[in-house]
Image (cartoon, helix red, strand yellow):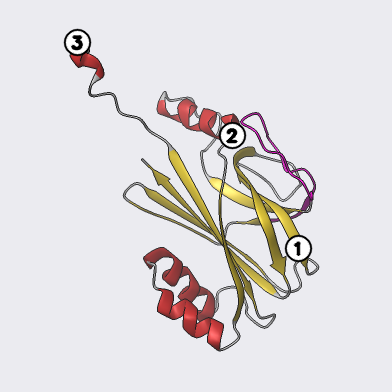
Amino acid sequence: MKNPSYQNIEKGKVIGEYTAVSLAPWVERGSKVVADIREALRTGNEAILATLRASGVIQEVKHVHNIIPTTGRSVLARLIVGDTTYSGEVDYGALGSDATPAFTNASTILGTEVYRSQADSQAFDDNIAYIDWFVAAGDVADQTFEEFGAFIDGTGSADTGQAWSLLKTGGWVKSGSMFISAKYTFV
């Protein structure tokens, strides 16, 4: 017979989902187009995305999942017990070009960081956090990015901050502007 005290054990995890949207080069940070894409991704409104694809604003949309390494989970554990060594804010995102990134729970940086940017939008709804980054046409050269990382308490310098999320992108192509949206669901 099972011990009844073990029947109500909750299992928690964080599910990280990323969407990278390759955009026409004329799309600018803070534009209505960016606001529409953000809204469409957060609400699941595929009609908005379809309209923007048909008009040539959106060139490509790719979805991937991430790994949340020990460093990121450690920051949350510290905060829960009152240790404020880190703020807990995911404030920077970075794109990398390592052709074969091999992230593990022990990973703390990207293989080859190429570009880093502050988050453009941060919001939450109940147990879901949303963080978005916008990369303008002239911010970094057009290329294919194979890795992405989100960092807690980062700076504008490469390899700074505590790795919250690291992922293999499967080849995010930037050929103009790019919008990157992260959705973290705490279950």
Q: Position of residue 177 (x, y in %)?
A: 67, 73
Residue 186 relative to residue 103: left or right: left
Q: Which mark is residue 69?
A: 2
User: Magenta region's main secondary structure?
Assistant: loop
Query: Which quadrant of the figure has residue 107?
Result: top right
**What secondary structure is found at the residue carrying circle 3?**
loop
Q: Which residue is mark 1?
A: 144
Amino acid identity at mark 2: Pro
Above or below residue 146? Residue 13 is: above
Residue 121: x %, y % from top left: 51, 61
Disc nearer the start of the sequence (2/3): 3
Identity of the residue furthest to the front in this view: 1
Query: Contact, CB < 8 Å: mark 3 with mark 1?
Result: no
Q: Nearer the viewer, residue 111 or 63?
A: 63
- Residue 68's tag is none
Task: Please state if 185 lies on the left or on the right of 57 as rendered.
Answer: left
Magenta range: 98-116
Q: Is residue 103 magenta?
A: yes
Residue with the mark numbered 3? 1
Residue at horizontal 71 percent and vertical 41 percent from the top: 160
Mark 2 Cα shell of 10 Å, populated few (<14), some (14-19), many (≥20): some
Q: Quadrant of the N terminus?
A: top left
Cβ atoms under marks 2 and 1 closer than 8 Å: no
Kind of residue at disc 1: Thr
The residue carrying pointer 3 sits among few (fewer than 14), some (14 to 19) or many (20 or more) residues within 10 Å by Cα, namely few
**Which residue is at 42% across, 36% downward?**
13
Q: Residue at x 68, y 62 (%)?
A: 172
Q: CA distance from mark 2 to mark 3?
A: 37 Å
- Magenta segment: does it hold 28? no
